[in-house]
Amino acid sequence: MYSWVKWRIGMCLLLVVTAHGAAWAQAPDTPGSLLTPDERAYLDQLGPITLCVDPDWMPFEGISRDGRHIGIAADLMALVAERLDVTFRLIPTQTWAESVQFSREGRCHIMPLVNQSPERDEWLIFTDVYFADPNVFITREEHEFIYDPARLLDEKLVLPQGSSIEGYFRRNFPNITLMIVETDTDALRAVSERRADVTVRSLSLAAYTIRQEGWFNLKIAGKLEEYGNRMRIGVSGQYES
């Protein structure tokens, strides 16, 4: 199966994810009818579509204590499964870095909510963007407003391992001191506990986590204008026949 067919399947996923209002009213009544016969046959041969997800990225997605995919992405994937008449199976992981590694190794078919990056282009085929959210600087309350990431040269920036934002700063600001942790929660905790000066995370995630954890000594100190979250579905390039 050529890569364009996998891209087309990814676009079917995207169509279902972004459908709403009148589009839903016009959606086909028969599950799976968005697919061509060749695409249907390919998916039937493939079996359950395996997912690698971020286990700690709420409210976007996570893995619950009982091993379920939860969050916004999980709800969207449930709609996709219904519309395309497919079955998704979660591949359990402990960290986002592990999920990225599993995807790179071809151990899962798709990543349902992922930023495109030069590194990930090496093994993923991406749909168009279906969700966007800005990246913001998170600091303690006493920190000044941040207009330019280049001004962080004298500070310690903490980021989750394997995140697209880590790659962005390594490529564009190699002289900034980085502290790498496992999860988004760990990054925010490091700033709250004064082990790091600043982190850069999704606005929605930061607001959710700060509220959940009660870290009210943290604030949004600016927006990273040059690099926001532009979420896509990433389809593994491993599965060609």
Image (cartoon, grey):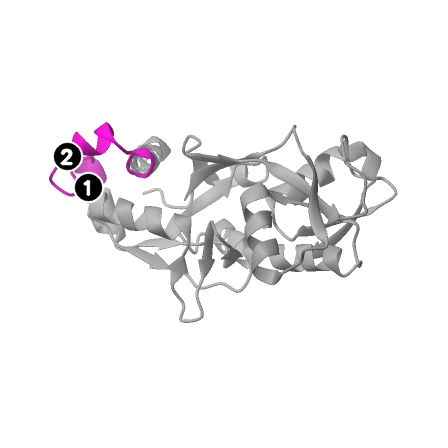
- Residue 3 drawn at (x, y percent): 37, 34
Task: Give the SS element for disc 2.
Answer: loop
Q: Which residue is mark 2?
A: 28
Taking the spot 67% from the left edge, 58% from the top edge, the residue there is: 215
Inspect the magenta stretch and tell me whether residue 24 lies in it: yes
Disc 2 marks which amino acid? Answer: Pro
**Relative height, residue 58 to residue 41 (above, below):** below
| Residue 109 appears anywhere in the view | no
The image quarter containing residue 151 is: top right
Q: Quadrant of residue 24?
A: top left
Task: Please state which of residues 231 and 203 is positioned toward the viewer in this rendering.
Answer: 203
Residues marked 2 and 1 touching at CB (< 8 Å): no
| Sequence-first tag of 2 and 1 | 2
Figure quadrant of residue 97: bottom right
In the rendered image, the vertical position of residue 118 relative to residue 99, given as above or below: above
The magenta segment is 14-39
- Magenta span contains residue 91: no
The residue nearer to you, when weighing 162 against 23, is 23
**Residue found at x 33% / y 39%:** 17
Q: Is residue 3 left or right of residue 191?
A: left
In the rendered image, the quadrant that contains the C terminus is: top left
Report the mark closest to the observer, 2 or 1.
Answer: 2
- Looking at the rendered structure, the kind of residue marked 1 is Arg
Residue in the picture at 21% in, 43% down: 83
Q: Which residue is mark 1?
A: 40
Residue occupying the far right of the picture: 154
In percent of width and height, residue 43 lies at 24, 46
Q: Residue furthest bottom?
A: 66
135 to the left or right of 102: right
